[in-house]
Image (spheres, rainbow, N blue to C red):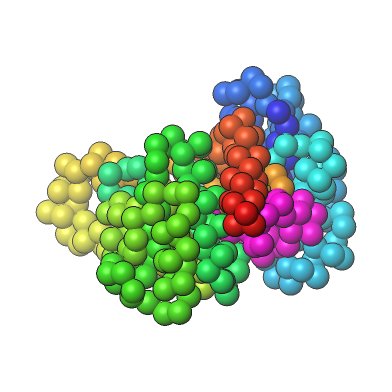
Amino acid sequence: MKIAIDAMGGDHAPDEIVAGAIEAVKEWRDIEVTLIGDETKISPLLNNTERIHVIHTTEMITGQDEPVRAVRRKKKASMVLMAEEVKQKRADACISAGNTGALMSAGLFVVGRMEGIDRPALSPTLPTQDGKGFLLLDVGANVDAKPQHLLQYAIMGAIYSEKVRNIPNPRVGLLNVGTEDGKGNDLTKRAFAELKQAPIHFIGNVEARDLLEGAADVVVTDGFNGNIALKTIEGTALTMFSMLKQTFMANLKAKLAAGLVKQELKGLKDKLDYSEYGGAGLFGLAAPVIKAHGSSNGRAIYNAVKQARNMVELNVTETIEKTIREMQQEEEE
């Protein structure tokens, strides 16, 4: 199995990207990793080149680049060459911690959509109180959506959760302003009706306040509201830890208390750590494409490789295509 990684994408590239790749090939003997980026910066970091290859390029897409224009004009950029490896079947999946919009464009224009999917969805796994996490999609690939798009998101999310996250019969919820049937705007009302008929375990509407309590294993929404929910969760977690730190550093008594609960606080931080869940999958493309967090460290990249490997090994893309195709055939009949 071969996985291509954009070595120049992210805040800590290429150091942490290379570190994560090295740990991944140590863990799984059945994978090879191709790092795409500046070889003069990558090679000194490779203390073990076994099953790690490098494609040299000095061109890269930055956070300031306009996504679509950058993908079309920067043909030798590390992210574009990474996607090209997948398109040419030289890699089974790809990972980047770089510009999110550019990765979505590279996924669409280079890797391509899978058959039967109208729009891909950006889908991170977020933490819950019980430590199991939940899949949220879409969080920004498409700010506008139609009911059939949410239906496709739900099917893709359910298959991924069952196959990769080992959740039997995952509970699928629709993000809404209330849990009662009939709540919401025109989009959610129409999507609700379609989800009820879908071959998934649809549990109805869920509210944003219940997401971190594990109200559902898969939560679907349009990219506009999904992105707001994601950023709110991220911001709340950062603010909470900042406030805790200020409180525990306020005086000597508070510092002594902090020392007594140090391990418990570390456990709480680990439970909310995005890096343990890998990256956000761009579901709906012809091959697994993983968007790692921009601030990913080596551990996050390692888990993104694990995520990509599982998706390839468990034939997630093929299963989604087959399910969508069967649904469309039933509708035609």
Query: x%, y% of residue 112?
Result: 76, 54
Say if the magenta span includes residue 179: no
In the image: residue 51, left or right of residue 280: right
| Residue 301 to residue 225: above or below | above
Residue at (39% x, 37% y) in the render: 168
- Image check: 214 left or right of 125? left
On whether residue 108 falls in the magenta region, the answer is: yes
In the depicted view, which residue is nearer to us: 194 or 12? 194
Q: Is residue 2 left or right of residue 284?
A: right
Total residue callouts? 0
Whether residue 233 appears in this view of the structure is no
Place residue 4 in its image quadrant.
top right
Tell me where residue 245 appears, x and y as whole percent.
28, 58
Quadrant where the C terminus is found in the figure: bottom right
Q: Looking at the image, can residue 117 be seen?
A: yes
> From which residue to which does the magenta span run?
98-126
Residue found farthest to the front: 333
- The residue shown at (72%, 37%) is 92
Q: Quadrant of residue 166?
A: top left
Q: Which sits in the foreground, 275 or 175? A: 175
Hey, which residue is sitting farthest bottom in the picture? 185
Q: Is residue 269 left or right of residue 195?
A: left
Q: Position of residue 123 (x, y in %)?
A: 53, 55
Q: Say above or below: 264 vs 154.
A: above
Q: In the rendering, at what x and y percent does residue 274 appear?
A: 45, 49
Query: Which residue is more in the foreground, 264 or 207?
Result: 207
